[in-house]
Amino acid sequence: MSAEGRRHWLVSVPGARSLRRQLLVWLLLPQIVLWVAAAIFTYNLAASYASRAIDASLSQASRALARQVKPLDSGLLIDFPRAAQDILEADPSDRVLYMVSTPPGQFILGNRHLPGVPAGVPTTEGEPYFYDGVLREADGASHVRVAALYLRYGEADGPAQTMLVQVARSSANREELAREILRDTVLPLSVLIVLMTMIVWTGIRAGLAPLSVLQRQVEGRAANDLAPIKISAAPPEVRALAGAINTLLGEVQHSVAVQKRFISDAAHQLRTPLAGLKSQTELALRDASDPELLARLRRVHESAVRSAHLINQLLLLARAEPESASLQDRRPLDLRRLARELCTEMVPRALQAGVDLGFDESGDEEPPVMVSGIALLLREAISNLIDNAIRYAGRGATVTLRVRQQGAQALLEVEDNGPGLPPSELERVFERFVRATHDGSGCGLGLAIVREIVERHAGQVRLAPLRPHGLVARVTLPCDDGRTPAQG
């Protein structure tokens, strides 16, 4: 399964949730709840303080008004000039209303529309009582805060009388004051919540960074790379996860190694009897004269040749695997010289197949194209490409091999003017045991071996069609800068 496929599978599991999102939700949810609770508490506290301030001003106003009412023998003397009344009622948005009466309801002075004292309220002389009410006037109704002050007047030896002084103030100012306090408090709290959210998000990202490192290590490796995951600087929880994955990788690696060892041992054991079978069939073909027997011997011989080729390819594939390739030396080598030598060696094979094989070079003084790699494996990869071109280009075709340097990359091309491949097969033929045609004696491992070897050398191999017909195999390898040490 590819890295993209593994990533899609991990994301598309039903019920899977982002760990980062869950942490963010569980860390921010208490903050939001606390923010709402703090806003409600702040508003109530602000309203309480505003009510206290208004009540204090109403208490002071009611006492001041009460001092302007003086008892006389014949009644009450009210020393409250009209100018003072106009001052109290001058501000329409914050009017101070008043009323003086003598219970049980004899109006004396002020605004007779003030809401009365709620029934059942115990009255205490000299101490104001505060309550909320609704002032209903011709232009509408409004909520007010009222202070009611009961005072006793009259002669000491005469009948005692009670005077009620009420002073009211609109509740709109109290609510506006509470809202202003709330705004002034909630705004800094909101900024702090935003800053806290950013800090929490940064902390979550930093805390989960080892998981991202682990993800990149797993996604960035090839499907057959079973090397342990290195995450030594991670927290213990992530190291435990990496250790569990490494244990699993070790078990898989052991299983794969057992299978590869079995294939290698079986291939080695089969080479000798197959070589003997080929020799015996060749001898029998020379000595036999019966046409029917010759046909059967040719089929046996072809099967033996195909089996021997398959065994050799399996052995080569086992050597090209990462575990085997990592044990072999990587040394600087001239890719152009290696390709030219292989082209020369395979000319007899091309002549036997009726193919014109040549190496494209502009002159004798071309500079070397240096790469770092395992000469034996690169030699087998180039040989497979040339062999495939000769095998499938067809009699009378032309196969051209060329090597050149493009920047920091070495480019090797094997081009033929044969029938080529359909676009749908250009990538599929690199899979193991996949053959685009059933002609010839191939086993479907040649291009798979080429890709395995090229990828072990940090390169790429691609097939591309030619016009009007033909195929070109392009191999790109990183050039050697002279600093790559041999690996043993």
Image (cartoon, helix red, strand yellow):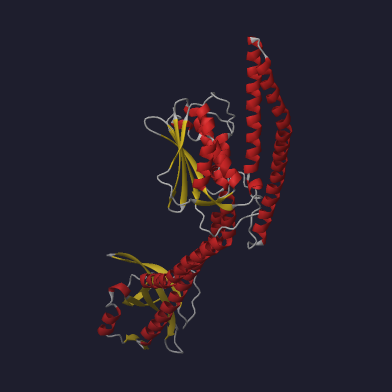
Q: Nearer the viewer, residue 88 or 417?
A: 417
Quadrant (top left/top right/bottom left/bottom right) for the N terminus? top right
Quadrant (top left/top right/bottom left/bottom right) for the C terminus? bottom right
Give percent across and percent down for residue 75. 35, 85
| Left or right, residue 281 beside residue 368 | right
Q: Nearer the viewer, residue 209 or 36?
A: 209
Is residue 214 in sight in this rendering?
Answer: yes
Give percent across and percent down for residue 70. 36, 88
Q: Nearer the viewer, residue 309 or 289?
A: 289
| Left or right, residue 290 beside residue 2 | right
For residue 187, above or below residue 470: below
Kindly identify the residue that appears in the image at 43 percent across and 75 percent down: 50
User: How many numbered tags mark residues here?
Assistant: 0
Is residue 17 in sight in this rendering?
Answer: no
Give percent across and percent down for residue 440. 55, 25
Kindly identify the residue that appears in the image at 65 percent across and 42 percent down: 319
Kindly identify the residue that appears in the image at 30 percent across and 72 percent down: 93
For residue 411, above or below residue 448: below
For residue 484, above or below residue 279: below
Quarter holding residue 448: top right
Quarter holding residue 76: bottom left
| Left or right, residue 123 beside residue 99 | right
Q: Nearer the viewer, residue 233 or 9?
A: 233
